Image: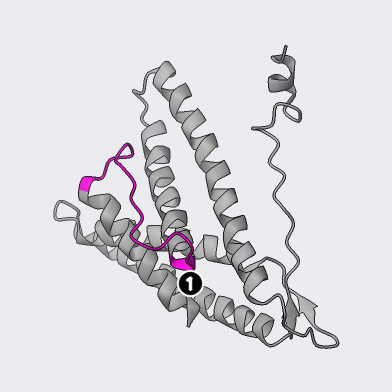
Amino acid sequence: MFTATAISIFEESIKKYHILDDVNQLFTNPYPSDSIEHLLYRKNWIDTVQWHYEDLIRDSKIEPVAALELKRKIDASNQDRTDLVEYIDSYFLNKYRSVQIQEGAGINTESPAWAIDRLSILALKIYHMKEEVDREDATSEHKNQCQKKLDVLQEQRNDLSTAIDQLIHDIENGRKYMKVYKQMKMYNDDELNPVLRGQKG
């Protein structure tokens, strides 16, 4: 199943990041650049770095200048994340471009890649919740509460994985079809964001 591969790659990316646990570390992708594995690994790495950006910006002692710089990094990361989702959807569009759509075929509420985006975030939630469960300095009550949350997250991942694999299977067999809308992010566009537009010229 596709999601088993995706989850394995997400876990590989998360573990690699946490060896150094540094948002500024050098990124290297172990997969061929023309492969879906390459896109999945890159996608999760972006999510992982952004997860830690979000931790850093919540530091109540952060200096305003550093916070502004970090906010801009988060904005850029959000754009990279969206771009990667669109690349992943392009992979599926290309892979199934010659499938004969069945009469009465439906469309899903979200594309495969946006569901995979949620699967990547779930991998991060599971990793960090597991850290809380295993924390040596945590109370038993804290560990028990986190274990309950971890159980829910793992159930959620199982359900989402089943849904994604079913969606891909339906697309592959023409029972559903893809219709992808490019995400029209406005905040980074100097023609659409009124603040940036006012700074031109």
Position of 41 with respect to 160 (left or right) is: left
- Residue at 42% x, 68% y: name it: 153
Farthest residue in the left direction? Answer: 136
- Residue at 74% x, 15% y: name it: 198
| Image position, residue 100 (x, y; %) | 77, 85
- Residue 190 part of the magenta-drawn span: no
Going by the numbered disc 1, the residue's amino acid type is Gln
Q: Nearer the viewer, residue 49 or 171?
A: 171
Q: Quadrant of the C terminus?
A: top right
| Image position, residue 27 (x, y; %) | 34, 46
**Pointer 1 residue:** 156
Secondary structure of the residue carrying tag 1 is: helix
**Taking 65 as reference, is 7 above or below it?**
below
- Residue at 44% x, 61% y: name it: 38
**Taking 189 as reference, is 85 above or below it?**
below
Position of 177 with respect to 53 (left or right) is: right
For the image, the number of numbered tags is 1
The dominant secondary structure in magenta is: loop
Position of 136 with respect to 14 (left or right) is: left
Q: Is residue 63 visible?
A: yes
- Residue at 36% x, 23% y: name it: 62
On the image, which quarter does residue 136 sit in? bottom left
Tell me which segment is drawn in magenta: 20-37
Farthest residue in the top direction? Answer: 201
| Image position, residue 166 (x, y; %) | 60, 83
Farthest residue in the right direction? Answer: 103
Q: Nearer the viewer, residue 97 or 119?
A: 97
- Residue 27 part of the magenta-drawn span: yes
| Image position, residue 47 (x, y; %) | 44, 51
